Amino acid sequence: MNKLLPQQVLFEGLNSRELAAMSKIIQRLKFKKGEQIFKEKEDTRGLYLINSGKVEISKVTADGWKQTLAVFGKGHFFGELSILEKRKHEAIAMAAENTDIFLIGKEDFEKLERENVTLAFKIMKQMALVMCKNLRHMNNKFLNALISY
């Protein structure tokens, strides 16, 4: 698993000692295409990192329609809002194809925050940078849609 971890965007810039520490707390999960990873209003299990495959994040609207919010592939992560805000999931995550995931358990993540502040900071900083990039991308798509309307 140590060779796979540097391919994760959240672990960019971590040294071999830090990667080894992360490998000790990561669980590896496999999901078949169409299998649900988590559902709305479910307690979070942790932070999910995609090793291979694709994950669709969606929400069911009040009138019963499924709305896809995002599709993530190898190297991306999800479930971060539930971890950071310490709340239940507000969307559904489903394997869009056979998917291999690394899970940093909620309790392990919280322990990391308490016991290895430097490593937790590096991961959270990387998480914030990726979230900012995603927000800029969504803003540009929204503005382009408004301009073309």
Image (tube, rainbow, N blue to C red):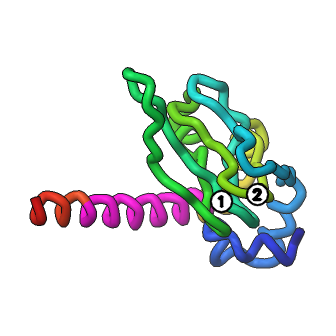
Disc 1 to disc 2, C-alpha distance: 6 Å
Please state if 102 lies on the left or on the right of 84 as rendered.
Answer: right
For the record, the magenta segment spans: 123-141
Indicate which disc residue 54 carries. 1
- Asked where in the image residue 99 lies, by quadrant, the reply is bottom right
Checking the image for residue 119, the label placed there is: none
Residue pictured at 80% horizontal, 69% vertical: 19
- Which sits earlier in the primary sequence, circle 1 or circle 2? 1
Q: Are marks 1 and 2 in contact (CB under 8 Å)?
A: yes
Quadrant including the C terminus: bottom left
Give x and y (percent) for residue 140. Answer: 25, 66
- The reply to whether residue 115 is in sight is no
Say what amino acid the circle numbered 1 marks.
Lys
Residue 125 colored in magenta in the image: yes
Q: Is residue 97 magenta?
A: no
Q: In the image, 132: left or right of 103?
A: left
Q: How many marks?
A: 2
